[in-house]
């Protein structure tokens, strides 16, 4: 009686199928993943540069409005009277009321052409002014306190045009910056404003933008500026790559204030975690992984089935050879087995 034939799947065929089909699909998946992350990083970097430029333009406009405001203060009768006749009571009340009505100003003061304090919105009489300041020129500087910005605007005599002094304002740069820009991009997206030469942080989340009062990625921005790069990856340990989840995507722009006032060499930086920037790709990658697993299983199942179909005739011939009493296969037996 003929024994039941047993069919064995050839392991070698399955290995070849995996190498020929599954391995290329794996490589294709990795290439698609890398290409998608790279292109999304580039797109996010370009968008961040555009936002930084818009924020810089908004900072320009806010600063110019502030200069116009100081000009209007210098034209007020109380301030002019204080400078001409040294009657300062009305000027002090006027400056104090103006400061209380403003959310941006923390101090307002008037100094004469010799830079001596004439009137102040605060009771204290101390006012630190930089060396080289002249009463006929507008001026701006980073204040001693974190986030403080000091502006000065000349007050001129309407008849002669001669300089009478300066009106000086101390601003909350954080409030000014947030009033003109509101960058929102996930939990880690943020915008920072800092002075390029000193690295002093003017506005932004200090715990994230800065190390103390200094912008944390000042050297990275300086290196990118020297290379003409508008966005880059920072805080990367090891070789830089657009696949690094521990990296920070940074774009920057320089407001045009520096052209008219060289001391205002400010930079707007926009930052976001690269992992969060790549978050929109995660659903697509999950679908690709599922598709890869299904296709790999299908390829291996087809390889096993084809191996089974190819191996069966060979197994039947082998059994017929073992059933031949003479021990020698006949041509008729071989033909029957093949059928």
Image (cartoon, rainbow, N blue to C red):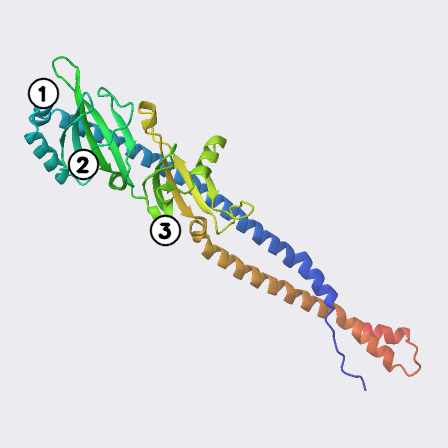
Q: How far is disc 3 from disc 1 in space, using C-alphas?
A: 55 Å
Alpha-carbon distance for marks 2 and 3?
35 Å
Q: In this view, does 298 lie above or below 41?
A: below
Residue with the most extreme top position = 160
Callout 2 secondary element = strand
Residue plotted at (42% across, 51% down): 276
Q: Nearer the viewer, mark 3 or mark 1?
A: 1
Label 1 Cα crowd, 10 Å radius (few <14 / some 14-19 / many 20+):
few
Q: Mark 1 and mark 2 in contact (Cβ < 8 Å)?
A: no
Residue 33 appears anywhere in the view: yes
Q: Which residue is drawn at 28% across and 28% down?
A: 130
- Between 159 and 255, the residue placed more toward the observer is 159
Left or right, residue 92 beside residue 303: left
In this view, 149 is above or below 24: above
Inter-mark Cα distance, 2 to 1: 22 Å
Side (left or right) of 34 relative to 283: right
Mark 3 secondary-structure assignment: loop
Crowd rating for badge 2 (residues with CA inside 10 Å; few <14, some 14–19, many 20+): some
Q: Tell me the SS state at disc 1.
A: helix
Circle 2 is placed at which residue position?
107
Quadrant of the drawing holding the C terminus: bottom right
The first of marks 2 and 3 along the sequence is 2
Q: Do the residues labelled 3 and 1 touch (CB within 8 Å)?
A: no
The numbered mark at residue 112 is none
* 66 vs 324, nearest the viewer: 66
Give left or right: position of 272 versus 18. left
Residue marked by disc 3: 186
Q: Mark 1 points at which residue?
A: 84
Which comes sooner in the sequence, label 3 or label 1?
1
């Amino acid at each position: 009686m003929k024994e039941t034939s047993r069919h064995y799947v050839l392991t070698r065929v399955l290995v070849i199928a995996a190498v020929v089909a599954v391995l290329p699909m794996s490589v294709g998946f990795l290439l698609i993943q890398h290409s998608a992350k790279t292109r999304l990083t580039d797109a996010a970097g370009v968008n961040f540069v555009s936002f930084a430029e818009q924020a810089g333009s908004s900072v320009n406009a806010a600063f110019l409005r502030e200069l116009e405001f100081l000009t209007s203060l210098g034209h007020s009768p109380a301030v002019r009277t204080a400078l001409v006749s040294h009657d300062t009571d009305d000027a002090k009340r006027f400056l104090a009321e103006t400061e209380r009505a403003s959310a941006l100003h923390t101090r307002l003061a008037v100094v004469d052409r010799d830079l001596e304090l004439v009137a102040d919105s605060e009771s204290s009489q101390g006012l630190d002014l930089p060396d080289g300041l002249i009463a006929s020129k507008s001026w701006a500087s980073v204040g001693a306190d974190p986030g403080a910005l000091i502006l000065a605007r000349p007050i001129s005599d309407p008849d002669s045009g001669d300089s009478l002094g300066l009106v000086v304002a101390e601003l909350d740069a954080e409030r000014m910056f947030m009033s003109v820009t509101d960058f929102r991009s996930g939990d880690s997206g943020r915008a920072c404003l800092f002075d390029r030469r000193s690295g002093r942080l003017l506005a932004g989340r200090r715990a994230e933008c800065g190390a103390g009062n200094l912008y944390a990625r000042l050297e990275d921005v300086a290196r990118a500026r020297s290379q003409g790069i508008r966005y880059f990856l920072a805080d990367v340990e090891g070789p830089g790559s657009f696949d690094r989840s521990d990296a920070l995507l940074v774009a920057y722009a320089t407001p045009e204030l520096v052209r008219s006032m060289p001391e205002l060499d400010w930079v707007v930086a926009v930052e976001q975690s690269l992992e969060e920037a790549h978050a929109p790709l995660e659903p697509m990658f999950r679908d690709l992984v599922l598709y890869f697993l299904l296709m790999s299983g299908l390829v291996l199942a087809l390889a096993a089935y084809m191996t089974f179909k190819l191996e069966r005739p060979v197994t039947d011939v082998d059994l017929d050879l073992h059933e031949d009493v003479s021990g020698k296969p006949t041509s008729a037996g071989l033909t029957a087995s093949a059928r």
